[in-house]
Image (tube, rainbow, N blue to C red):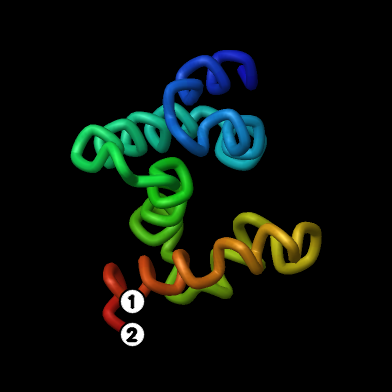
Amino acid sequence: WKDMVRGWAAQLPDGPDRSEEIAENYGRAAEKIVQRAYEIYQNDRSHGSPLLQAEVEWTIQEEWAWKPEDYFVRRSGKAYFNSESQAKEESFVNNLFRKFILY
């Protein structure tokens, strides 16, 4: 399964780095997340993190994440297990939540 997701995400700028994590965290839903990432990337080829954006959108729309902490703690676990990654993504993720949740 991970190899399949890795193959789907290979053409995305953040795909090689994030595809295994997406496959592990979302299972079969990973396919929908990667599809959404391609839509984002098709609309903006300069977008550096379409897979991250698609993942955050998924957590908001399908898993009822209401704030960035929901994503970083409950879903990705980055608050506990990968704080370096969280620090790099925090501003981007916060902006996405502001856009979609309007908090």
Between 83 and 73, the one lying in front of the other is 83
Query: In the image as oriented, which residue stretches furthest toward the bottom?
Result: 103
Please provide percent x and percent y for residue 96. Answer: 36, 66
For residue 19, side relative to residue 98 (left or right): right
Q: In terms of image quadrants, where is residue 85?
A: bottom right
If the image is split into quadrants, where does the N terminus sit?
A: top right
Instruction: Report the amino acid beneath label 2.
Output: Tyr
Per the image, label 1 sits on a secondary structure element best described as helix
Mark linked to residue 98: 1
Between 51 and 48, the one lying in front of the other is 48
For residue 19, side relative to residue 12 (left or right): right
Labels 2 & 1 near each other (Cβ < 8 A): yes
For residue 96, side relative to residue 93 (left or right): left
Per the image, label 2 sits on a secondary structure element best described as loop
Between 87 and 39, the one lying in front of the other is 87
For residue 71, side relative to residue 95 (left or right): right
Q: Residue at x 33, y 85 (%)?
A: 103
Q: Residue at x 46, y 48 (%)?
A: 55
- Read off the residue under disc 2: 103
Q: In terms of image quadrants, where is residue 33?
A: top left
Instruction: Report the amino acid beneath label 1.
Output: Arg
